[in-house]
Amino acid sequence: MTTTTESLPLIELRNVVKNYQSEAGVFPALKNVNLNIERGEFLGIIGKSGAGKSTLLNMFTGVDALTSGEVIVNTNEESISLHSLNENDLALWRGRTMGVIYQSFQLLPMLTLAQNVMMPMDMSDLYHPRKSRERALELLDMVELIDHAHKLPSLISGGQQQRVAIARALANDPPVIVADEPTGSLDSITADHIFKLFERLVQSGRTIVMVTHDKGLMPRFSRHVEIADGELFSEADRK
């Protein structure tokens, strides 16, 4: 009986280890992490500062090399061992498959909001002068910023900049959205608006993985796991 990629988890982390070398010796940032991320779920990864949250994100976005283990991504009717790709193929794959949202927004200050949203299309060899602009404006309209499309990031608020970052992450229509503390620097009302936008994206079929230190957000995820000292555990592990 043949197993199709659609029946497999979207992302599989198998015995992932990440060690960093420091003056004091080897620091284990991740310790034999195993995690399956399913299609269409809103997964929360919760932990304190230094617990390994961002390192974990870097493993399944391919931003950082792992020490041992494997990350498998099952998309487009194929399974990819992520860290077996060379740097160029990995960068192209990431640009087309994953949208990444950072706490610090990371918008380019010299580009307009529309130009910021179009940037991932250009970097993934998907840029088209007319279609890319139309796509950028559609996304800015979706996050209710169409009237600010031609402004620079410095002329809008922090909450609005985060919404631009979300639009940018959606530029190439990726199946996976990865968010690193996306509401950490926002006030509670703005953060709630961002969270509701994430929930609508999940309802539309996206898979979202979000890391946060805020345990108060647990009920809003479809599933959550916790990380402490580089080890992953769920509520079932506590019982």
Image (spheres, rainbow, N blue to C red):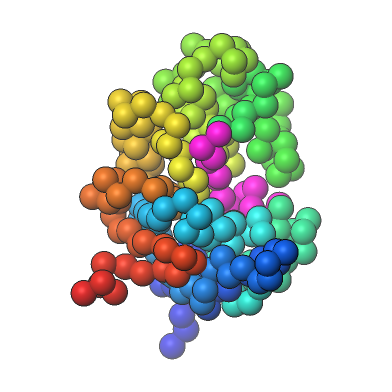
Q: Is residue 69 above or below residue 212?
A: below
Residue 191, image quadrant: top left
Q: Where does the image place residue 105, in percent across and percent down from the top left?
A: 56, 32
Q: Is residue 93 above or below residue 214?
A: below
Query: Does the segment drawn in magenta span residue 100?
Result: yes
> In this view of the protein, can residue 170 be seen by the observer?
no
Foreground of the two, 119 or 35: 35
Figure quadrant of the C terminus: bottom left
Q: Where does the image place residue 131, in percent across and percent down from the top left?
A: 63, 29
Foreground of the two, 1 or 53: 53
Say which residue appears at 56% left-offset and 50% top-offset.
98
Residue 9, image quadrant: bottom left
> In this view of the protein, can residue 230 be seen by the observer?
yes
Query: Does the segment drawn in magenta span residue 42?
Result: no
Magenta stretch: give its range: 92-104
Q: Is residue 127 above or below residue 85?
A: above
Q: Is residue 225 left or right of residue 102?
A: left
Say which residue appears at 78% left-offset and 56% top-offset.
88
Foreground of the two, 160 or 99: 160
Q: Where does the image place residue 186, in percent across and percent down from the top left?
A: 41, 29
Say which residue appears at 59% left-offset and 41% top-offset.
172
Q: Where does the image place residue 45, in percent across and percent down from the top left?
A: 40, 56
Figure quadrant of the N terminus: bottom left
